[in-house]
Amino acid sequence: MVLIILIVTVHKIAGSYLRREKELAEARFEVIQAETNRLRQQVMNLKKQADAAEQALAEERQKTEVCYCLLFS
């Protein structure tokens, strides 16, 4: 009888521990998922900024080429 009570007690303790660990793992996953989404958004924003900078640079180069051609033609 004592053995059965001991097994039931250990089972309850193990179940509680596993439930807590599962909840912690799920919480960690949610935090990591949110951080991943934040970093993805940051990458997209930086790519847009880089594309805009490349476009502005291309426009400035074109203006410079036109001015150079006008000066030396």
Image (cartoon, rainbow, N blue to C red):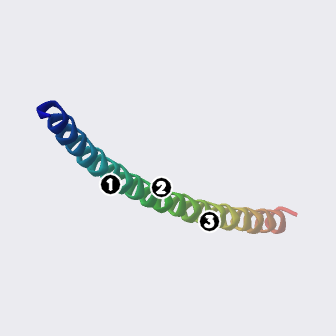
Mark 1: few/some/many CA within 10 Å (<14, 14-19, 20+): few
- Measuring from the top left, give residue 10's x and y in whole percent: 19, 37
Sequence order check: which comes first, mark 3 or mark 2? 2
Report the residue marked by disc 3: 48
Are the residues tagged 2 and 1 within 8 Å (C-beta)? no
Sequence order check: which comes first, mark 3 or mark 1? 1
Report the residue marked by disc 1: 23
> Residue 36 vs residue 70: left or right?
left
Measuring 30% from the left and 44% from the top, which residue is drawn there? Answer: 18
Mark 3: few/some/many CA within 10 Å (<14, 14-19, 20+): few
Mark 2: few/some/many CA within 10 Å (<14, 14-19, 20+): few
Report the residue marked by disc 2: 36
Secondary structure state at the residue bearing disc 1: helix
Q: Say which amino acid is labelled 1.
A: Glu
- In the rendered view, tell whether residue 49 sits above or below residue 1: below
- Measuring from the top left, give residue 29's x and y in whole percent: 41, 52
Answer with the quarter of the image where residue 46 lies. Answer: bottom right
Front residue of this view, candidates 8 and 44: 8
